[in-house]
Image (cartoon, rainbow, N blue to C red):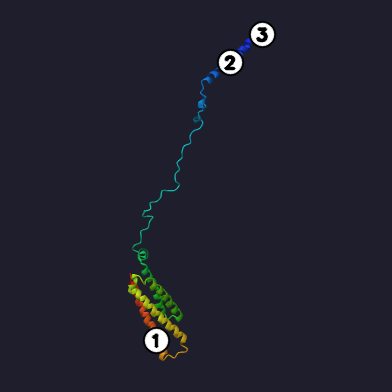
Amino acid sequence: MRKLCIIFLIILSAPLNCYGAFFSKQADNVDTSKGYVGTLPDLTKEYAPSETSVSTPIFDKTKDFNSANEVKPVPRDDPAFVNIILKQDKLSPYVSDLQEFIEMLEQIYDSIESGENVQRFAARVYYFKKNAEYFGEKYANEPESSYISYEKILELSAQAQSVANLRTEAEKYKPYLAYTGSGAIYNSNSIDQQLEYLKTEVERIINILKDTN
């Protein structure tokens, strides 16, 4: 019985010794300076690489900019387009100033034509006078000062202011003046003549300004 127990213990201990000897032998051949030398699992079997997706625009193809159906042709036959759009940037500052004076003088002409009261007429003339003074200083040392339009604006400004003063004084002093002798200048006939002459000059200067390019 004792022999059987000894034999049984020998049989059980044999695999353990062999297993230990195997790892002992393997350990003798391992170079520990290279880090881990075991076998890594194959991850490609479980994880497939994701495919790169290509996005497409959600809008339609851009229309051709030069499409005849999308771009309207330039209205070169339209006088308003030609006169306002195409020629606007070609006007010199001097000619632009003349355009403003044409409007002022047309208002003075209409004021005389319609028999507008003294206060409104004097206000229009005063506005014209102040603009003419600035205009005169602006171009005094410029080549434009030799233009006839420049000279006529300054002359007409002085003439219009003289008539406006005459009308204002007549309105102010008429209760105290006898329209004979020196007071005759303030009578209605005299003032009407001055206004008619001024209206003729205003019309003439307007035409000169319109002819200036």
Inspect the image, locate mark 1, and give the three-letter code of the amino acid beneath it: Ser
Q: Earlier in the sequence, mark 2 or mark 1?
A: 2
For numbered disc 3, what is the local secondary structure?
helix
* Residue 59, placed above or below residue 13: below
CA separation in Å, label 3 and label 2:
23 Å
Which image quarter holds the N terminus? Answer: top right
* Residue 180, placed above or below residue 56: below
Q: Quadrant of residue 158?
A: bottom left
Residue 119 drawn at (x, y percent): 46, 80
Which image quarter holds the C terminus? Answer: bottom left
* Residue 62, placed above or below residue 167: above
Q: Nearer the viewer, residue 4 or 74?
A: 4
For numbered disc 1, what is the local secondary structure?
helix
The residue wearing badge 2 is 17
Q: Nearer the viewer, residue 165 or 69?
A: 165
CA separation in Å, label 2 and label 1:
149 Å
Inspect the image, locate mark 3, and give the three-letter code of the amino acid beneath it: Arg
Q: Residues within 10 Å of mark 2 (few under 14, many from 20)?
A: few
Q: Nearer the viewer, residue 95 or 116?
A: 95
The residue wearing badge 1 is 190
Inspect the image, locate mark 2, and give the three-letter code of the amino acid beneath it: Asn
Q: Is 7 on the left-hand or right-hand side of 118?
A: right
CA separation in Å, label 3 and label 1:
167 Å
Q: Residue at x 36, y 79 (%)?
A: 201
Q: Residue at x 34, y 77 (%)?
A: 204
The residue wearing badge 3 is 2
Confirm or deny contact between disc 3 and disc 2 (CB under 8 A).
no
Q: Earlier in the sequence, mark 3 or mark 2?
A: 3
